[in-house]
Each structure stands twice: as structure tokens, then as C-alpha cells.
Amino acid sequence: MNRPITVFIVDDSAVVRQVFSDFLKSQPDIRVLGSASNPIIARKMMQKQWPDVILLDIEMPQMNGLEFLRLLSQEHPTAVVICSTLTEKNAPETMEAFRLGAVEVLLKPGRLVDGLEQACAETLLDAVRSAAKSRTRVVQRASEWFQNSMHTTERPTANDKKELQSRYALPPDFAPAWVAVGASTGGPQAIELLLKGVADCPPTFIVQHMPERYTAAFASRLNQHSPLDIAEARDGEEMRRGMVRIAPGNLHLQGEYRTGRLRAKISDGPRVNRHKPAVDVLFHSLARSDARGLAILLTGMGSDGAAGMAELHQRNHLTIAQDRESSVVYGMPFEALKRQAVTMVLPLTSIADLYWRLS
């Protein structure tokens, strides 16, 4: 039998600590080591036994969550799940937490008096189990890759494009009409690296598993340092070159051709693979396109995107999965690989290089 996942909860709300702790203790594969109201107390308590996963609030007295994350990255890299309330201030701070090495974000329920509702409970379990499978070393390395990336905002030259054809054995004159990207755990760091230094691109759709409002903050953060037009997707918006659109949290994103023009479609509906937005919803929608595209499946736990990538592959679109070594969690890409739905398996740096050269 595998040993249980060990968890420590750091939150200044006694109610949150109690409710989260009681629920997690009821799970046979999870062991709660303890809880604390701030990182200073937590740090002392965790010296006795360091946890696999830390559930971490952002706003706390004496030391906030971001300061604690910086310390952890230097002293004791650990899988951290950010537990945050839904506020305009916390959304950008959560994006900073991803940069510092957090692997998941969990939206705190508004009401906890009667315990966790089923949807919140499932989300909490998914976040903890996913974080436990993550490799913090890879998260740190992604930050190093980002800092050392050679790409500038200059457009690739003709020689760059010739090298692309030979290096990746692409079909002659391959020029995708669109790009679709799916990611989950470890995805924010991977997507930031993918887009770094890209001055132009085919119309690009991105589904990153993330709660509502945080997706807008994520898009805004990416847009601040990029010449690309990066934003949260809007229903009916025409997709053109140089545009990157992020699926809004708690809604599905699709791409569809209407009157010969590629548009984003936003819709509500049930969760798919326990996710909304779901990568499969996006991939299936674009698989029906006659215009040949490129689908990329990045790091993440679970199987979301694998079925959609299989349909894309069957319909002769180019499909790329991130490799095991560079993935924070090698779940989603591996599921696509098992379905024989992948044209190429590449490390994250090569995927970023290919995307830049296709721009």
C-alpha cells in the first residue's frame, strides 16, 4: 500500500483550517500533519515532519503567503496549493504565486459553516492529489528556462523556418491556421514560457484549468510583457493572427468557423472530465475544422484533452505532447500518448521553440 499524502494547512481562518482538516482526515490516502495561522508558526511546526503538500493562504499576519513561498523556494521546495478568496487583489497575487512555484490554485468556498459542498470537496481533493504528484524541481527549472530563454520579440527569419522543417520533421510548408493549447498542474509556468518572446502567432486558444476571475488575471499578466494580443476569450470574437485567448474560468471555450471566419465560442454546460473549462471541449470543436491546425497538450494531472487530441490526430491535425521529463505532472500528455494521438513528444523548451518559429 502506498503511504498517504501528508498535508499541512496554513491559513489565518480557524474555520478554514478546521473544515479543510476534518475533510482531508476523512480520506484514506491523506494524512494531515497539522495546521497553523501563519507561516512563522507553520515553519516551526513542520520541522518535525515536512509535508508533501502545503495548503497556503495569501493574506496572513506577520508573513504573507508570497513571502513564505519565496522562502520555501530557497530553503525547502514543496508542492504548494494556494487557497485564496475571490477578490480583485488576490487574483494578481495568485499569478505571482505561480511564478514563485505554486502548482495549483484553490478558490476558498464562501460559506463553510455546514462543511464543504461536494463540488468544493472534489476540487480540494483533486488539488491535493495533483500537487502530491507534481515535481517541484521541474517547477523551479521552468523558471530557470524562462529566465534563460534565447527568444526575442524579433520575427523568425526564413532560415529559422527552414531549420524548423528539418529539426522537427514537419510537413513541407506547414503553417497552422490555428493553435490550441491545453494545460493543468504546472501549466501557468509552461504557458508563460511558451509565449515568451513571440511577436506574432497563428490565432491561439488556451485552456488552463483555473477558477473564474483568475483566468482574467492570468491573461492580463501574460499580456503585460508581450507584443501579442492576450486576453480572456469573449464569445463571438473573431480570431486573427497575433491573438491569444484564454478560456474563462467556469466556462467552456470552443473554436469554430462561421462564414469563413474563425471565432471564439464561450458556453456554459456541465463539467467535462470534472473540469470547466475543459481541454477536450476545445480540442473536439477544432477537430472538425478543415483548416489544418496545431494542438499542444502540456503538463497536468488526469486525462482531459486526450480524447480531443485523438480526434484531432485522426483528422490529420498536428498534435504535440509535452514529454515526461519537463512535465510537472505527466498525466494529460501521457494519456494522449497512450491513445496513440500524438504526432510528436517534445520537451517544453522545444515546444516553445517550435511555436516561436511557426510565428
Image (cartoon, rainbow, N blue to C red):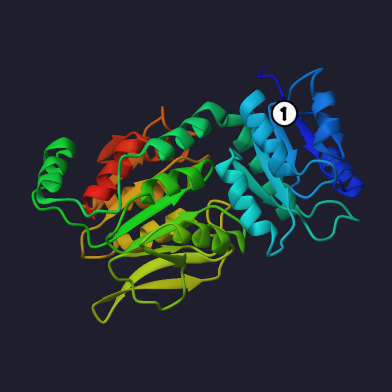
Q: Position of residue 139 (x, y in %)?
A: 52, 34
Q: Is residue 51 left or right of residue 257?
A: right
Q: Is residue 341 left or right of residue 268?
A: left
Residue drawn at (68%, 65%), measured in percent from left and top?
A: 88
Q: Quadrant of the C terminus?
A: bottom left
Query: How many residues crowd around disc 1 within 10 Å: few (fewer than 14), some, or many (20 or more)?
Result: some
**Residue identifier under label 1:** 29
Above or below, 209 against 268 in this view is: above
Label 1 element class: loop
Q: Position of residue 64 (x, y in %)?
A: 76, 44
Q: Nearer the viewer, residue 25 or 325?
A: 325
Q: Quadrant of the N terminus?
A: top right
Q: Is residue 142 left or right of residue 344?
A: right
Q: Position of residue 227 (x, y in %)?
A: 36, 62
Q: Position of residue 355 (x, y in %)?
A: 28, 49
Residue drawn at (48%, 37%), measured in percent from left and top?
A: 143
Above or below, 46 against 259 in this view is: above
Please identify the quarter of the rendering in which residue 32 is found. top right
Please identify the quarter of the rendering in which residue 145 is found. top left
Visible residue check, residue 194? yes
Q: Nearer the viewer, residue 51 or 274?
A: 51
Counting labels gives: 1
Visible residue check, residue 76? no
Above or below, 65 against 34 in this view is: below
Please identify the quarter of the rendering in which residue 72 is found. top right
Q: Amino acid at mark 1?
A: Asp
Looking at this view, name the residue that lies furthest to the bottom.
259
Q: Is residue 337 left or right of residue 65?
A: left
Residue drawn at (50%, 47%), measured in percent from left and top?
A: 188
Residue drawn at (28%, 46%), measured in percent from left and top?
A: 319
